[in-house]
Amino acid sequence: MHDDLERQAYDRLLAWKRQPGHSTLEVSGARQVGKTYLVNKFADNEYKNKIYVNLLDFSGELFIERYEDLRNEIKNGLICENPVYELIRRYRPDFTDSPDTVVIIDEIQESAAIYNRIREFTRSLKSDFIITGSYLGKILDKGFKYSAGDLDSIEIHTLTFEEFLMAMEEYPLYEKMDLFGNSTEDTYEKLSRLYYIYSMIGGYPAVVLQYLKTGSIEDCQAVLFKIIKLFIQESKRYFEDILDDEVYDNMFSCVARILVKEKKGLDKDSLSEELQNIVVKDYSSNISKASVNRALDWLYSSGIIGFAGKVTECSILNFRAKARCYFMDIGLTNYFLTQIGYAKSDISGIVNENFVYLDLKRRINHPGEIALETPAFATLGNGELDFFVKTIKGQKTYAVEVKAGKNNSKTIQAVLDRQKADYVLFAKGNTHGGINGSVFTIPVYGIGKFQF
């Protein structure tokens, strides 16, 4: 086991670098997911020269000063053929403009002025540019101009189960494991134990490193608690008016309460209305729907939660977005379900469902493997399915069930009888897997290996 966590996103950074005529790369993602570490490691390995600017520290202050000075000089008549080159040369006199140089500007959300110059960065120099930011504050600041045409982008998330296994030096076991019961008892037991640890601690790099160091789930949850507190504190500077401190602190718990509710059992037809109901009932009676909506969108754009849609009567064309939400790290799911006092015996079912959600969400990203904008649950009559999946290539549909529900078997039978899906997939915690006609059963931790 080692401190240098292997990340699958590294290959995507390499692919960007090798692509002819690539643009500036924007690496985004939630706080504490390891963006800065990964980008610096990539730069150190793949380039001869690296210039690193962090707009939140002294290097950023100096960079902004050089920018302001140059801008004023140009406004006052200085003739400058290549302002971007001049800016970087003033910041770093040893700057060499070549494909072997990369300029990294971290915490880009701190300066709309620098962000809006990205077009010029990309077009004016031979050097590569990478910008990074967490829950980019630009979504709220009208000063940020949209320049996606000149940006390639990669989003970094917390460690996947596969990356956790790499850190634990157990990935070969997972690679060899057969999804449908043809591996040894010992293989399934060992992977099941590893998945249990992962489901308790999640994939924030600092949390995983803590586990590698101490092997203590309790220590890991203390690190996770610090990450949550840091996020809440930092978020408040963007939201002076949104909610009082107590309510903001408890938004996470409200999201956890929504996760626990049966999907069809949501009292309101809108996720934000349901969340507002919980906030008003439990914490404060003067919170508007608009405030809750903003908080919900903020948690989403921050990479803390993700949305799921709803497919009514298993009809893929009858889709409604933002019908449910999940945490973007199952360590968070576990932590907040425990915080709200949810029964320990039931937590694993919700965590497993959240785990499958995250796997499906990855499959929607380019190049898309499955359809729709977000993963979606489905209804059929009075029953419901945890997820409904349609593949892009084969145009096949799958009813996916993760946790055992009351009407679970009846609904699945109705799906098959009424030919509402081509296949049924059970992803369970206590199975070695198997195939029975058009019904597949797999261990939940193997969902990443399943080919839809």
Image (cartoon, rainbow, N blue to C red):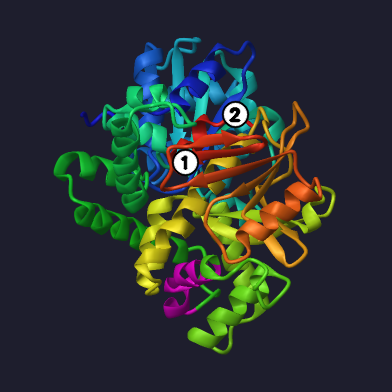
User: What is the span of residues highlighted in magenta in the rendered image?
Assistant: 244-258
For this orientation, the residue located farthest to the bottom is 285
At horizontal 59% and vertical 74% (from top left) the residue drawn is: 275
Quadrant holding the C terminus = top right
Q: Is residue 253 magenta?
A: yes
The residue to which callout 2 is attached is 451
The amino acid pointed to by label 1 is His
> Which numbered disc covers residue 225?
none
Q: How many marks?
A: 2
At horizontal 58% and vertical 66% (from top left) the residue drawn is: 406
Judge whether 130 appears above or below 247 on screen: above
Q: Residue 381 falls in which quadrant of the image?
A: bottom right
The residue to which callout 1 is attached is 157
**284 horizontally vs 341: left or right:** right
For this orientation, the residue located farthest to the front is 436
* Residue 402 visible, this orientation: yes
Mark closer to the observer (1, 2):
2
Q: Position of residue 80 (x, y in %)?
A: 60, 22
Q: Is mark 2 on a helix, strand or loop?
A: loop
Judge whether 56 appears above or below 289 on screen: above
For this orientation, the residue located farthest to the left is 214
Q: Where is residue 437 in the image (x, y as percent from the top left)?
A: 65, 34
Judge whether 156 appears above or below 183 on screen: below
Instruction: Report how far apart the C-alphas of labels 1 and 2 lie in the structure.
Output: 22 Å
Q: Position of residue 206 (x, y in %)?
A: 28, 44
At horizontal 80% and vertical 47% (from top left) the residue drawn is: 316
The amino acid pointed to by label 2 is Gln
